[in-house]
């Protein structure tokens, strides 16, 4: 089985298969600058052999991980691995979300040198792996897999449907944003324990961080309070009332950090509906209504008013936290590889292709870049997404443009896509059409530029 790896940077040291003694991570106090600038991410798929040749110092890739994953990308020291049949655009989307969390101003230099260095110093690999799993059975098999030691197992997982390409722009909650922020939050906990730390209550630790104290105030109960008859009992004035009793005090801190950050940057206010809900069910503030049973604050202004300790932590203590919503569009055309989700739906009384939920779109493609158009959604069944250099009123007159074009799979089946690399010979304008049905792509135009 081939492993496809997405490239980027220098020495992310993933441990080999030998067993090592457990030790807690201690951030380096003296290393606060990035001494060697990381390579600009390209998000290019590579085979395992190509990846090893490009990064011969990387360890841990011969420990059985190839039994589960065949697609990888390394983003500023974090490996994103995907199982077979995972749509390539979902992998790229997830990688770009994490890139935006680490480099929110998108200048290709991580915003916080300490967070960047933390990922490079993760010699055990425990904090530098995000996985996209394909089925529940494979997920369970992966969780139980222990290749020599358990260093791969504590990965942040994304499951089918979690990575919503273009969904946040459309007002739908993108689960990938939350799950990947949890991974980012773990780095904050380790690098800045005084403010973001997660005291191990189960191990008897009694110290508190700024974050844990703020959460105790938000819940109205502290770490010593246990569920009663399978329920958390919150006071009426509590504004953080997460009701999953399997999520104990430490887990509650992870969720709390996500809530305050999503509120603070305006992500919650921008969303109209929960994941998987159609657009016609959305409404302004719809996501806030959806989570009202566990989180009562929806705007930055309200966060400042009701939960000033967390507001102060996020805004006034000098941390270089992401302040812009990560839509998974990192680098725009300044990076080489891109992924889009194709759907077929009724717009204006007629069926049309849409790209990332947009049926009327002029998309600019850059010469030298490669673009994946995913046709995994069921609505694509029997409908091919094709390129043409000519604009014609009837599909019969169309001549398919095939230079630099590759297709995989069957439209409507998971993992199917059409890919195009824009080179010096690509026409300045490309048009979309469907050989099986007239008119599906007439409102989509592709413009190429140098």
Image (cartoon, rainbow, N blue to C red):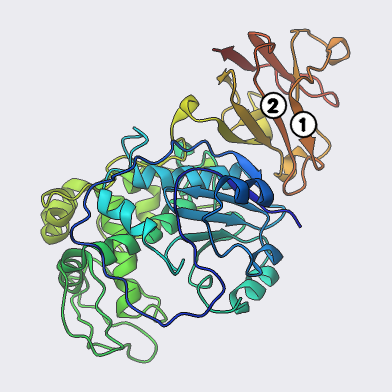
Left or right side of 326 for 64: right
- The residue at the point 73 percent across, 49 percent down is 414
| Residue 64 as seen in the image, left or right of residue 197 | right
The numbered disc on residue 83 is none
Q: Earlier in the sequence, mark 2 or mark 1?
A: 1
| Residue picked out by circle 2 | 420
Q: Is residue 445 left or right of residue 306?
A: right
* Residue 105 image offset from top left, x and y in percent: 31, 35
* 327 sits left or right of 396 in the view: left
Task: Give how far across and how far down residue 255 sits, in percent.
Answer: 34, 66
Helix, strand or loop for disc 1: strand
Report x, y in % for residue 417: 72, 38
Q: Position of residue 141 (x, y in %)?
A: 67, 75
Q: Counting other residues with Cα less than 10 Å from the Cα at mark 1, is it few (<14), some (14-19), or many (20 or more)?
A: few
Of residues 109 and 448, the one drawn nearer to the viewer in this rendering: 109
Answer with the quarter of the image where residue 31 lies. bottom left
Q: Quadrant of residue 362?
A: top right
Gap between marks 2 and 1 measured at Cα: 6 Å
Residue drawn at (59%, 14%) of the image: 448
Assess whether mark 1 and mark 2 are in contact (beta carbons under 8 angstroms).
Answer: yes
Residue at x 36%, y 84% (from the top left corner): 231
| Residue at image point 48% right, 72% down | 154
Nearer to the camera, 434 or 1: 1
Q: How many marks?
A: 2
Q: Is residue 181 above or below residue 392?
A: below
| Above or below: residue 370 compared with residue 39 | above
The residue that mark 1 highlights is: 406
**Quadrant containing the N terminus in the rendered view:** bottom right
């Amino acid at each position: 089985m081939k492993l496809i790896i997405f490239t980027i940077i220098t020495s992310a040291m993933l441990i080999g298969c030998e067993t090592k003694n457990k030790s807690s991570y201690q951030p380096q106090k003296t290393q606060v600058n990035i001494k060697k600038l990381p390579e600009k991410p390209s998000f290019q798929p590579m085979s395992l052999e190509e990846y090893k040749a490009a990064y011969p110092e990387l360890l841990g890739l011969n420990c059985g991980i190839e039994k589960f994953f065949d697609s990888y990308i390394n983003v500023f020291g974090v490996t994103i691995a995907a199982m077979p049949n995972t749509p390539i655009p979902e992998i790229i989307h997830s990688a770009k979300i994490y890139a935006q969390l680490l480099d929110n101003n998108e200048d290709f230099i991580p915003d916080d040198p300490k967070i960047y260095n933390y990922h490079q110093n993760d010699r055990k690999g425990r904090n530098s792996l995000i996985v996209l799993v394909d089925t529940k059975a494979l997920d369970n098999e992966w969780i139980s897999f222990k290749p020599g030691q358990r260093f791969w197992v504590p990965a942040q997982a994304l499951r089918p449907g979690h990575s919503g390409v273009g969904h946040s722009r459309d007002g739908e909650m993108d689960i990938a944003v939350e799950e990947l922020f949890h991974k980012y939050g773990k780095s904050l906990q380790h690098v800045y324990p005084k403010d973001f730390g997660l005291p191990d209550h189960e191990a008897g630790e009694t110290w508190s961080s700024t974050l844990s104290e703020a959460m105790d105030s938000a819940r109205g109960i502290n770490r010593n309070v246990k569920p009663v008859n399978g329920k958390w009992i919150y006071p009426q004035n509590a504004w953080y009332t997460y009701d999953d009793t399997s999520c104990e005090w430490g887990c509650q801190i992870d969720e709390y950090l996500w809530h305050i950050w999503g509120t603070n940057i305006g992500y919650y206010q921008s969303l109209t509906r929960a994941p998987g809900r159609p657009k016609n069910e959305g409404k302004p503030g719809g996501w806030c209504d959806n989570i009202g049973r566990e989180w009562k604050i929806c705007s930055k202004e309200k966060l400042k008013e009701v939960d000033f300790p967390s507001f102060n932590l996020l805004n006034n203590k000098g941390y270089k936290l992401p302040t812009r919503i990560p839509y998974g569009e990192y680098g725009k055309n300044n990076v080489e590889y891109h992924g889009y989700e194709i759907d077929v739906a009724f717009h204006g009384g007629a069926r049309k292709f849409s790209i990332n939920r947009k049926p009327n779109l002029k998309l600019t493609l850059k010469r030298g870049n490669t673009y994946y158009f995913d046709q995994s959604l069921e609505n694509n069944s029997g409908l091919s997404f094709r390129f043409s250099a000519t604009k014609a009123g009837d599909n019969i007159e169309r001549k398919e443009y095939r230079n630099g074009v590759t297709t995989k799979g069957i439209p409507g089946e998971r993992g199917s896509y059409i890919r195009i690399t824009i080179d010096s010979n690509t026409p300045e304008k490309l048009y979309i059409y469907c050989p099986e049905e007239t008119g599906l792509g007439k409102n989509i135009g592709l413009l190429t530029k140098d």
